[in-house]
Amino acid sequence: MTDYLPGPWRFKIGDSFSATDYLIEQDGGDDRGFERGLVIMRWKPSPYCETKIEQANARLMAAAPELLEIVREAESRVVCQCIEICGDNPDCLHHRIEAIIAKAEGQNP
């Protein structure tokens, strides 16, 4: 498994360093006593990308840890049903879930 800061994460615009930067932060404090979350990513809005698209992408990235957790839970519930029904069909839900978890963990390019 790939190490990453645990979620939840949040997307926000601006902080004390820049009012316009886009940030993805770990939501809330951490075990070192920080009041706000640790900044995971910071970037300047692109003049070449529509704001609503860039912000939608950022919200999706911020949801990633929670999405991965839910996908792992779903995989554990689907595995028994799919093995009996789908066999080795690579398009079955179980195999698709396995592939996306592997991709998120850096096991699959």
Image (tube, rainbow, N blue to C red):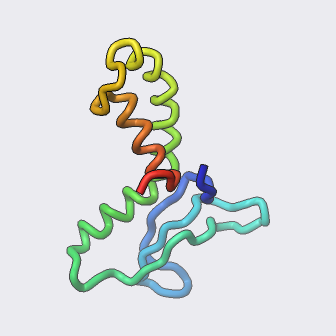
97 or 13: nearer the eye? Answer: 97
| x, y percent for residue 41 | 50, 72
On screen, residue 53 above or below 78? below
47 or 88: nearer the eye? Answer: 88
The quarter in which the C terminus is drawn is: bottom left
| x, y percent for residue 55 | 32, 67
89 left or right of 7? left
Residue visible at 77% across and 65% down in the picture:
33
| x, y percent for residue 69 | 52, 41
Residue most extreme to the top:
84
On screen, residue 86 above or below 75? above
56 or 103: nearer the eye? Answer: 103
62 left or right of 6? left
On screen, residue 58 above or below 13? above
94 left or right of 32? left
Residue most extreme to the right:
32
| x, y percent for residue 87 | 36, 19
Residue visible at 42% across and 75% down in the picture:
22
Query: Residue 29 sits in which quadrant?
Result: bottom right
Residue visible at 32% across and 19% down in the picture:
86
Query: Residue 31 sits in which quadrant?
Result: bottom right
On screen, residue 85 above or below 99? above
Residue visible at 39% across and 12% down in the picture:
84
